[in-house]
C-alpha cells in the first residue's frame, strides 16, 4: 500500500536566498518604470518648451524691432522710418501669446494621448506596489 501514497514536499527559499535571487533578477530586468518616467518627462518638456520657445522668439524679435524703431526716432531723427519699424516690432510681440496658445494646443493634441497613457501606467504601477506593500504589512487572516 505504500506504493499508492502521494508524497509532497515544499521548500521555500530562505530570506538570504530570496535577496540573492532578487538582486540577480534585477540585473536582467529592464526598468520599465524608469523608462516610462523618462519618456513622460521628455514629452511633458516638449509640450511646455516648444510653445514657450516660439513665444519667446517672437517676443524678442518684436522687442528688438521696436527698440530699433525707437532709436531711429530718438537718436537718428528718422520719424517716419522709426514709427514704421516700431509698428513692425509691435506685431510679433502682439502675436507671441496667441502663437504660444496655438502651439501648446497642437503639442497637447500631438502628445496628450501618450502622456495620459504613460501617466496612467505609472500610477497603476505605483498603486499596485502600494497594495503589495500593504498586504505584506498586514498579517493574512487564516
Image (cartoon, grey):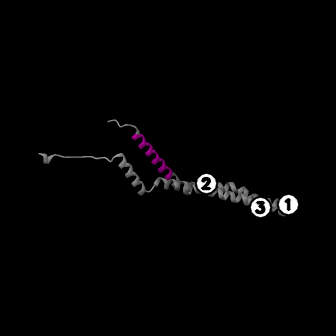
- Give the image location of residue 63, x and y in percent: 75, 58
Looking at the picture, tell me which residue is in the foreground, 8 or 118. 8
The stretch drawn in magenta includes residue 51: no
Q: Is residue 141 left or right of residue 113?
A: left
The magenta-colored residue range is 117-136
Q: Which mark is residue 93?
A: none
User: How far apart are the alpha carbons under marks 3 and 1?
Assistant: 12 Å
**Tags 3 and 1 touching, CB below 8 Å:** no
Q: Which residue is mark 2?
A: 48
Q: Which mark is residue 73?
A: 1
User: How far apart are the alpha carbons under marks 2 and 1?
Assistant: 38 Å
Looking at the picture, tell me which residue is in the foreground, 26 or 45. 26
- Give the image location of residue 120, x and y in percent: 48, 49
Q: Residue at x 45, y 48 (%)?
A: 125
**Tags 2 and 1 touching, CB below 8 Å:** no
Judged from the image, the secondary structure of the residue bearing numbered disc 1 is: helix
Q: Residue at x 42, y 54 (%)?
A: 26
Instruction: State which quarter of the image contains the N terminus.
Output: top left
Determine the image quadrant of residue 80: bottom right
Q: Which residue is mark 3?
A: 65
Judged from the image, the secondary structure of the residue bearing numbered disc 2 is: helix
Q: Earlier in the sequence, mark 2 or mark 1?
A: 2
**Label 3 crowd (10 A; few <14 / some 14-19 / many >=20):** many
Judged from the image, the secondary structure of the residue bearing numbered disc 3 is: helix
State the predominant SS element of the stretch in magenta.
Answer: helix
Q: Is residue 102 left or right of residue 92?
A: left
Q: Residue at x 41, y 43 (%)?
A: 132
- Give the image location of residue 6, x and y in percent: 18, 46
The stretch drawn in magenta includes residue 129: yes
Q: Earlier in the sequence, mark 3 or mark 1?
A: 3
Q: Residue at x 66, y 59 (%)?
A: 54
User: How far apart are the alpha carbons under marks 3 and 2?
Assistant: 26 Å
Amino acid at each position: 500500500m505504500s506504493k499508492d501514497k502521494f508524497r509532497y514536499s515544499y521548500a521555500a527559499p530562505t530570506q538570504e536566498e530570496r535577496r540573492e535571487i532578487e538582486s540577480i533578477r534585477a540585473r536582467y530586468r529592464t526598468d520599465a518604470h524608469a523608462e516610462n518616467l523618462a519618456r513622460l518627462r521628455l514629452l511633458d518638456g516638449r509640450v511646455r518648451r516648444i510653445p514657450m520657445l516660439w513665444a519667446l522668439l517672437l517676443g524678442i524679435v518684436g522687442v528688438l524691432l521696436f527698440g530699433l524703431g525707437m532709436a531711429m526716432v530718438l537718436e537718428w531723427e528718422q520719424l517716419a522710418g522709426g514709427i514704421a519699424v516700431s509698428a513692425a516690432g509691435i506685431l510679433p510681440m502682439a502675436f507671441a501669446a496667441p502663437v504660444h496658445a496655438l502651439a501648446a494646443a497642437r503639442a497637447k493634441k500631438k502628445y496628450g494621448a501618450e502622456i495620459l497613457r504613460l501617466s496612467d501606467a505609472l500610477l497603476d504601477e505605483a498603486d499596485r506596489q502600494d497594495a503589495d506593500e500593504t498586504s505584506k504589512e498586514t498579517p493574512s487572516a487564516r
